[in-house]
Amino acid sequence: MESRTQVGIVGAGPAGLVLSHLLQREGIDCVVLEDRSREYVEKRVRAGVLEQGTVDLLTELGLADRLHREGLVHQGIELRFDGEGHRIPFEELAEGRAITIYGQQEVVKDLIAARLDAGGPLLFEVDDVSLDGIDTDEPTIRFKHEGVEKELHCDAIAGCDGFHGVCRPSVPDGVLSFNELEYPFAWLGILAEVAPSTDELIYAPHERGFALHSLRSPELSRLYVQCDPEDSLEDWPDERIWEELHVRLARDDGWTLKEGPLVEKGIAPLRSFVAQPMQYGRLYLAGDAVHIVPATGAKGLNLAVADVQVLGEALTKYLKGGDGSLLDAYSDACLRRVWRVQHFSWWMTWMLHRFPDDDGFQRGLRRAQLEYVCSSRAAAATLAENYVGLGRDW
Ligand code: FAD
Ligand code: DHB
């Protein structure tokens, strides 16, 4: 069965869904295709930190009512080591900009509900997605839905299907260059039914490995421990996770970590990755489909949203006015920010983790950087302004 749309969007993560709303606002037709079920994507626990720019865009699109009701606005984070906390105050160092804690799956739920309410096509559980003719003016997406083979003819395709998707591998060999760094550790993340033991996020470097105390709501805590990338969940019974968290997050002043039943547990690798350019023919790649940052900087979701903000404007100019100049410049317009965020995420990861092959020199450098960030206003401001987001000029 054949059909037509202006923009075919592959993937209903934050990138694909935000793009669909940006296009819908401009009256541009698009179809979103997602290979998982609605229930699965709405339950997938991932990011939790939204930059000011992400919140502002969702607000402008009329998609942030629940976010403003339930999201937690934070004006700082704590770096904790050697039993002491050091606060990085955003209100002083980042011109009052803040972050909002609101789970990625809550953002995804809100965006899906609004899209379906507006009658926009969003198909779940599509199979066998493949792209054809991406170097022509009528690229096509082939897929199967409810047992029926379909062909969707488009003016452009947005590849928003994450790191393991099909869009990036559809670009012919030799076109993209790949830049990658794998880290010799992973994060074990848990969601626990217990009131957070902290008001602000705690990033804790420790000789046994990094730990992070984050949160989701007044009743739900989100915590991470650095682990070996080869570890499996069987290596980490609940008692071991709590024991490591107690040791790595310890503070000398009697602060204690509250424990609660775990409702989610998962291991995620840490990776830096950029494929460039971010476009080929009429295929435009956005978000995790084309770059990955290690989670330490809390940037992946925000970078995905920033990409599609640029792409939405460029597609609008092309499809409404026939002017393709912004589309041609899409990759260059994004890559400057992508590399800035890559650097920040790498730097935070380098500074805060224990690397298994560390020698005394590397340990000394890491320690010097950490102490500098905690004692110099200029160094702390660098962390703060990158963490809250440098704004859309980058
Ligand atoms: P995705 O969210 O991966 O969406 C891609 C979608 O495409 C998925 O729904 C997938 O099912 C679908 N798909 C895949 N293949 C196909 C196909 N063939 N056909 C159709 N659909 C397909 N980022 C932050 O900003 N802040 C944080 O605090 C943070 N913490 C994180 C913690 C963890 C543990 C992890 C794993 C990630 C974290 N991130 C964080 C990163 C963030 O979650 C991602 O960067 C973000 O999900 C990227 O959005 P996306 O839309 O590009 O990709
Ligand atoms: C969370 C995830 C991150 O990667 C991070 O740096 C901070 C917080 C979170 O899931 O809350």
Image (cartoon, rainbow, N blue to C red):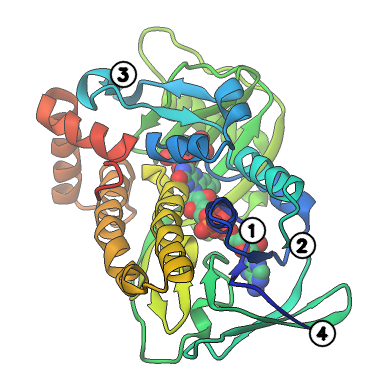
Q: Which residue is mark 1?
A: 12
Q: Residues within 10 Å of mark 1 (few under 14, many from 20)?
A: many
For marks 1 and 3, give the CA distance: 39 Å
Q: Which mark is residue 85?
A: 3
Q: Residues within 10 Å of mark 3 (few under 14, many from 20)?
A: many
Tag 3: residue type? Gly
Q: Which residue is mark 2?
A: 124
Q: Residue at x 37, y 7 (%)?
A: 253
Q: Secondary structure at mark 3?
A: strand
Q: Secondary structure at mark 1?
A: loop
Q: Is residue 125 visible?
A: yes
Tag 1: residue type? Ala
Mark 1 and mark 3 lie on one chain; the one further toward the N terminus is 1
Q: Residues within 10 Å of mark 4 (few under 14, many from 20)?
A: few
Q: Secondary structure at mark 2?
A: loop
Q: Position of residue 140 (x, y in %)?
A: 62, 84
Q: Which residue is mark 4?
A: 1
Q: Position of residue 164 (x, y in %)?
A: 57, 70
